[in-house]
Image: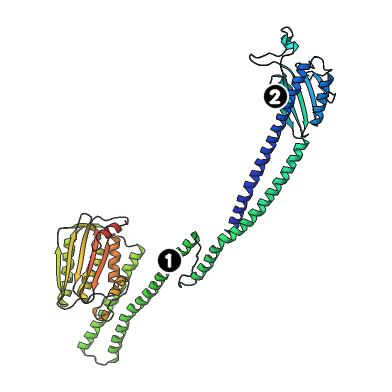
Amino acid sequence: MRSRIFVFGLLIGIIPSILFSLGFSFVYESEVEKAEVLSVTSESQILGNDILTSGYLKSPTDDAVNITLDSVAQSLSGRILVLDKTLRVIKDTYSLYEGRTVIWDIALKALSGATAYDRDKVNKFLTVCVPITGETEETADPKMAASAPVKRAGTVPVSGVIMFVCSMENTALSRNSQGSFLILFLAANIVAAFGISLFASKRLTAPLRRLSSEIADVEKGFSEPVLKENSSTEVAEISDHFNSYAAVMKTMNDSRQEFVSNVSHELKTPLASMKVLADSLNSMEDVPVDMYREFMADITGEIDRETTIINDLLTLVRFDRGSDELSVSSVRINDLLELLMKRLSPIAEKANVELVLETFRPIVAEIDETKFSLAISNLIENAIKYNKKGGYVHVSLNSDHRYFYIHVEDNGIGIPEESIPHIFERFYRADKSHSREIGGTGLGLAITQTVIRMHRGEIKVKSVLDEGTRFAVRVPLKYITEEKDVAAEENENEDF
């Protein structure tokens, strides 16, 4: 990138300079040429007057005119030819073509009444042909005018042509001087562009090189974000975004490590219990049948617990991979909740907890019945397990034109305020002291949240320690195939 910035900056500096030099040279040369032609044209008009008034075209022996022509030719460092209307040379300051008739395109153009010029860049001279206009004795005489060129209506007749052949040496020297200046200008621009490009390439890529070095350090391990680019450029934004990304990745890495640790612990605990029970049986002779049955029942319970953990883990893995798609169908939510309450009533009776279901209207929604039943069942079962003897679990169902709402409320032990943000994390237990006696895998709420989000729904919780907990679930009546921003609806009704 540094080399590209350098080359780009160099081209940005050089190309405009070259274009400017070429344009300036062309304009300068064109303007000098126009000035030279204008000067010669003005001189020719004066000479044309003298030639007409003296009758020089008819009798080219006028010494005053000849002296003037020679003097002007010498001052211009060139040559003057005077041609009559038949293109016969009546005066040549070089005395080479006098008396000869020349057929030159440039002379023919001038004879038609227009000033014409031609530049010989190789030999460095400029040829200008200027018509001699005005009435002469010949053109004034109708009989003599018959042989003259056709005279257009409203135009002045052309009596002859003055041809100037001027040296352009001085102009060439001036152009060379101007070219030297442009070369110096171009060289200065190239040097300046080189220096600026080198400086800019180093300055602009320095933050990126630092970021690259620091990113390489971060790649060695997700430590605290180390990017500290304080420049007020896009690089600072990249630094901030990467810091945020590194923080997220660190959190994910920590969560992954904690998850693996929790999985190992949860899977190892039932195995350890089974081993202790089995070793106890093996170490005793003539084990009583009652004790044998008791120990085997405990082993069966630990096996069931292990199976539950593995099944829950597999469920979460399928959800994470997106391989477990929803099988959506229209379901009567009232009937679904009644069935869940009936299944969980033995657990509630055993824990001396009252189950209450309240529905406000018949509701039919598009859900995956199996997965959604698992999610709501986890909420109700947790409300029973983490309750007090003689407590209650109140489940309510309601809806509006877009969503249906399920509230699961209990008056149990509640959740500590500092634990509420973490209760949907895998294997997290708010009350670790009762986790063993209550049971469960610590994955139920994680599964519940995942299932509800798969249905494009939302779940929220409010709890007061030793007073109770309230879970609020909101799910669209019609299954939405794409996720939508529901922030506006959440702001309208934060508690659903």
Q: In which quarter of the image is residue 180?
A: top right
Q: Mark 2 points at which residue?
A: 115
Spot occupied by residue 57 in the image (x, y as percentages of width and height): 79, 16
Q: How crowded is mark 2: few (under 14 residues within 10 Å), some or many (20 or more)?
A: some
For residue 6, say whether it is visible. yes
Q: In this view, does 455 lie to the left or right of 96?
A: left
Spot occupied by residue 147 in the image (x, y as percentages of width and height): 73, 10
Q: Which mark is residue 433?
A: none
Q: Is residue 279 left or right of residue 410?
A: right
Q: Is residue 149 left or right of residue 61?
A: left
Q: Mark 1 points at which residue?
A: 244
Spot occupied by residue 76 in the image (x, y as percentages of width and height): 79, 31
Q: Tell me the SS state at disc 2.
A: loop
Three-letter amino acid code at the position of disc 1: Ser
Along the line of sight, the residue nearer the viewer: 493 or 452: 493
Spot occupied by residue 379 in the image (x, y as percentages of width and height): 23, 69
For residue 486, say whether it is visible. no
User: What's the residue at 80%, 20% (across, down)?
Assistant: 89
Q: Which quadrant holds the N terminus?
A: bottom right
